[in-house]
Image: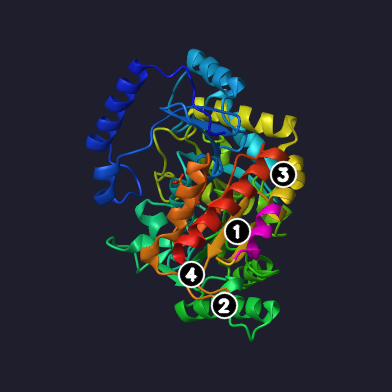
């Protein structure tokens, strides 16, 4: 990494400056602190290949975050470019409203039905994860209306769960920082506590802690009234909330509670699907549950084009496909639902994941990655290392013994990320934490580079805190 490209010319530098200014002055970025943005602007990335990205100065970085938990097959896949170009030439777009389709949309739906667990055989497309979750809510409301249970509407989710940025998905999101300065739909959504084993009461065993969290869900359902609760939303491993792996048996036990009260279980696999944990879907293969609905996006196309999907069960389909009130139809959908070009990218992406045995690779090299990152837990600053395979988080703390939090003003996560960047590695800062979600094609050499770079960077930042 970290090498300067000798082919960068003066004309490139002028173009870079133009792009940088246009971006700073006109592109309103997502999730951005505009007070600092106005001064620093953006890093401009102009090329990518394999697991590396290159900035406009020609400096290369190993992408330790896979774009944003999504570039699962890595960059520069010509096959995807060709599949996309072929589809654009054949038919770039046609509405899928009503009784129209295109081959990629139909074939990808069948492929997802085949890969998804249990009887999750029906696919509704959107453009990303937030919309997949919004769709799940509308679908669930429609389902209970159709069943003649119109009061069953309330949604339960967890503190520190992340489900997206549209109004409904952000209301379901439980990361409290994300709600500051905005409003959410508090009439419809209820948050229960986060099953974070690191922050549990030390007097509780993991089993007792699990029971406590599951009981909390049941109590919340009883408090709202089972006739009013429609669904429980949960990520198999919470991603943006800090890669929180719940205690053993949590998902199975929460699913049982949901079944007891006829509450639908929505597994948000926007991050965990398509190989990140070594399976096409993690719900069943990693956590032993078959939910009612799986939402996915990101790794579905490895980020090459926007696409999301809400995959749901035969049971739901049977109910929503029954005739409704006179003349009424399922009035939900988007211009780009089932976009043929995105679906062509998705099909090719899954073909590559399967053909190259990426899930097996993740089971092997991802396990090595997990081991190397866990070794960083011995460092003074690192309170917890958690996650599985290619989904990891380092929680930095002021005091390892008491688990005391660092002063947020110290911006330790950002400083570690900056120190890594200087050394040619991109990691994601998240408050006092650092997140890793690299492309899934990482080699052992890449893993060693990430582990060693992180170690040096954390040690460097630790020194500055003394
Ligand atoms: N759900 C989870 C678990 C996510 O991590 C994200 C995004 O990071 C979303 C939903 C929202 O997806 P999108 O940004 O594609 O709308």
Q: Name the residue under label 2.
A: 218
The CA span between labels 2 and 1 is: 20 Å
Q: Is residue 377 magenta?
A: yes
Secondary structure under the numbered disc 1 in the rendered image: loop
Residue 236 falls left or right of residue 117: left
> Compared with residue 199, is residue 170 higher up or lower down, i.e. above or below?
above
Residue 365 falls left or right of residue 174: right
Q: What is the magenta range? A: 372-379
Q: Name the residue under label 1.
A: 237
Total of numbered circles in the picture? 4
The CA span between labels 1 and 4 is: 23 Å
Instruction: Kindly identify the residue that appears in the image at 75 percent across and 47 percent down.
Output: 363
Q: Are marks 4 and 3 in contact (CB under 8 Å)?
A: no
Q: Name the residue under label 3.
A: 362
Q: Is residue 292 magenta?
A: no
The CA span between labels 1 and 3 is: 16 Å
């Amino acid at each position: 990494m970290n090498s300067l490209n000798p082919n960068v010319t003066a004309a490139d530098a002028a173009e870079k400056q133009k792009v940088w200014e246009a971006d700073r002055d006109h592109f309103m970025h997502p999730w951005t602190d505009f007070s600092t943005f106005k001064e620093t602007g953006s890093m401009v990335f102009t090329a990518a290949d394999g697991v590396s990205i290159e900035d406009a100065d020609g400096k290369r970085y190993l992408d330790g975050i896979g774009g944003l938990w999504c570039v699962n097959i890595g960059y520069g896949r010509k096959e995807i470019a060709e599949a996309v170009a072929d589809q654009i030439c054949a038919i770039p777009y046609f509405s899928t409203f009503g009784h129209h389709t295109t081959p990629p949309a139909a074939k990808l739906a069948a492929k997802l039905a085949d890969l998804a667990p249990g009887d999750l055989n029906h696919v509704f497309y959107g453009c990303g994860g937030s919309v997949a979750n919004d769709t799940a809510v509308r679908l669930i409301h429609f389902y209970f209306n159709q069943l003649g249970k119109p009061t069953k509407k309330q949604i339960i989710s967890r503190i520190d769960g992340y489900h997206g940025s549209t109004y409904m998905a952000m209301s379901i999101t439980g990361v409290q920082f994300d709600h500051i300065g905005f409003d959410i739909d508090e009439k419809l959504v209820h948050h229960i506590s986060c099953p974070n084993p690191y922050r549990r009461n030390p007097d509780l065993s993991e089993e007792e802690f699990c029971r406590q969290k599951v009981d909390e869900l049941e109590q919340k359902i009883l408090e709202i009234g089972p006739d009013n609760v429609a669904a429980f939303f949960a990520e198999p491993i919470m991603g943006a909330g800090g890669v929180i792996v719940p205690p053993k048996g949590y998902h199975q036990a929460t699913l049982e509670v949901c079944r007891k009260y006829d509450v639908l279980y929505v597994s948000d696999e926007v991050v965990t699907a398509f190989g990140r944990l070594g399976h096409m879907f993690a719900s069943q293969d990693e956590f032993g549950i078959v939910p009612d609905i799986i939402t996915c996006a990101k790794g579905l196309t490895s980020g090459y084009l926007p696409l999301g999907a809400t995959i749901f069960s035969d049971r739901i389909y049977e109910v929503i496909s029954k005739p409704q009130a006179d003349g009424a139809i399922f009035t939900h959908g988007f211009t780009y639902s089932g976009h043929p070009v995105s679906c062509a990218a998705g099909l090719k992406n899954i073909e590559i994941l399967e053909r190259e045995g990426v899930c097996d690779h993740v089971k092997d090299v991802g396990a090595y990655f997990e081991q190397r990152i866990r070794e960083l837990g011995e460092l003074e600053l690192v309170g917890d290392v958690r996650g599985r395979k290619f989904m990891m988080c380092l929680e930095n703390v002021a005091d390892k013994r008491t688990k005391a939090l660092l002063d947020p003003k110290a911006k330790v996560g950002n400083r570690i990320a900056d120190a890594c960047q200087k050394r040619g590695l991109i990691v994601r800062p998240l408050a006092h934490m650092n997140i890793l979600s690299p492309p899934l094609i990482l080699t052992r050499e890449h893993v060693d580079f990430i582990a060693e770079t992180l170690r040096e960077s954390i040690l460097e930042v630790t020194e500055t805190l003394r």
